[in-house]
Amino acid sequence: MSTTTRRAGRLPSSCVNCRRRKIKVSDGATSMTESRTDYESATNRRPDPVTGEQFKLMAAIVQHYAPGIPLSVESLRTFVSKLQAASQQPDFPTDLAQQVPPADTSSCSPVDGGHLLPGVAAKDSASPMSDGSFISDATRQRRFNGASSYAVLQSKVSLCITRSFPRLAALQPSGTFDLREGEPLSNKQDAALPDRKTCERCSVVFLRFVNCVFYVLGPEKLFDAIVRAHGNAEVSVSTQAMIQLIVALIDDDPHHFELASNKMESVIEEGSVESIQAIIVMALYRLKKSQRNTSWVVLGSAIRIAQSLGLHVATDDESPLWAEQKTKLWWSLCDLDQWFTSVLGRSLGITVDLSTIGSPSDNLIGAPNMPPMYAFASARLTRLLSRTLQCNSEKHCDNGNAIDRLIQDLYGWWESLPQHLTIPAAAIPPSLLRATLYLRLRYHCIIVLLTQSYLFNATFSGSDADHRMNICEDSNNKTIATLIEMQERDVLTSHFWFDSYHAVTCGLVLLIRIIKNPASVDLRDMVIKLRSLLQMFPDRLHAFAVQCFDKVLEDIEHRQPETTTFDSSIISFETGLPNLDLWEQLGFSESNFDFNL
């Protein structure tokens, strides 16, 4: 066998493919094969394993920029696909902002469209009915803004700049500007405050007769404000004004009222919850002084501040205690606004649909003079009062069926009350007596307000009209009985103007009834009792009502039942309104007492 044949049949000493790849390259040069091999190794080789620390850091980044996203493979794939789809949209991605909030989520709040605002907690969210957002204003006060407000638009533009134009965002200030002119509001202690003993004494009376039926603030907060106002701690101007107004209301002190009036500009400028409370007490004082129109205007300021603070909007981040406090305060404003509409015949200041506002829970805020479930029942009654006023305003159509349905709803409200709110007065604890009886008084007065046109208007006839007139008379009798019971048990007061208001309106209905039926002995007895009750209120309106009752009793004593009126100079049924403007003096509008519906 030749040498060539032996070499051809010799087994290779190494792998042929490996030997073929061994290319001799001189130093300092790189061949194309080597470059291609290095590239393939870099792209195809298995990546270095991720350490535990790297995984934790990446997971923390994902949770920070996308809170609540599960870390499973499918969830991450879905999330990334949404990010890629959103990045292709030319406009600012709204849904992306909802899922990927800014880095500083501890100081942001969602706005309409999913945008976030600096300065408010991340969990703040307006209810669907609110159509707005909570934003910190120039004074760094957390306020509620409508979706069409300039503040919401500005915040959206600011966030868009922050996300899309980082160089332009660097020019934005880190905080909000203080747009107020002049010096900040002073919180220094007022040397003109009443002494602490006077403040505490008046506060006890205020809580017993006013705050128990018309919530303004909790007793703990009131006494704490008095302690701080007379100590070294700083208190707001609104708190100082509120203390002075409570003293002025209870002691009938014009001096402290003037001092508080001088602070009202600063109180309104402050725009806080304390501002609302101070303005409410101011309105109650002016009502007591028969300044009803001024009181109505003042109340409008409190309503605007309350709406700007979002007392009517429920958020997820607020504490249960604060939620109950602001809900109670909101319903107090609603109730006062409704009665102002009834008294003055003016338009409502609160235009929010009350059916969308939750009622107070009465779980956390208690008071020694307020029975359990009082605030909840009172809020439901305020809704019925709103429907009553709306029903009375529809005087150009036959709304008898609507009145009947509303009467049934009022009866249903009474039947749904817990037992401790419907028991006889003798079984009610003394500390809860005023609030319980006042709730019944409001209930009967609303029924009278709903059905009194059937008593005044002789054109209504038929069995249905007679039935509604009987309901009005029966509720009027129960109103008188409740007022007399409150007087006998010393829970009727002149500190709260609506006590006198319900007394004189009840007397007005009784006056019409006894003029129509002067021979009734029962009506005569009620006139005598109500006349003595009206004398506890010293203003000229109640004095005039007493004179009217005296004239009625005098005419009955002289046996003149055949006359339809005891004095034509006092009431004339032909004109439809009293000649001496009794309706105007009472503050009623023609829409509420219209003889010619």
Image (cartoon, rainbow, N blue to C red):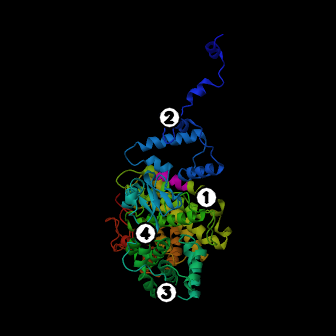
Answer with mark 2 or mark 4, whichever residue precedes in sequence.
2
Answer with mark 1 or mark 3, whichever residue precedes in sequence.
3
Q: Which residues are magenta?
A: 403-411
Answer with mark 4 or mark 1, whichever residue precedes in sequence.
1
Main secondary structure type of the part rendered in magenta: helix
Answer with mark 3 or mark 4, whichever residue precedes in sequence.
3
- Residue 534 position in % (x across, y down): 49, 77
Spatial CA distance of label 1 from label 3 is 45 Å
Answer with mark 1 or mark 2, whichever residue precedes in sequence.
2
On-image quarter of the N terminus: top right
Tell me the element at label 1: loop
Looking at the image, residue 516 lies above or below residue 97: below
Q: Which mark is residue 35?
A: none
Could you classify mark 4 by the number of other residues whose Cα lies within 10 Å: few (under 14), some (14-19), or many (20 or more)?
A: some
Q: Quadrant of residue 262?
A: bottom left
| Amino acid marked by disc 3 | Asp
Q: Which mark is residue 561?
A: 4
Location of mark 2 (residue): 36
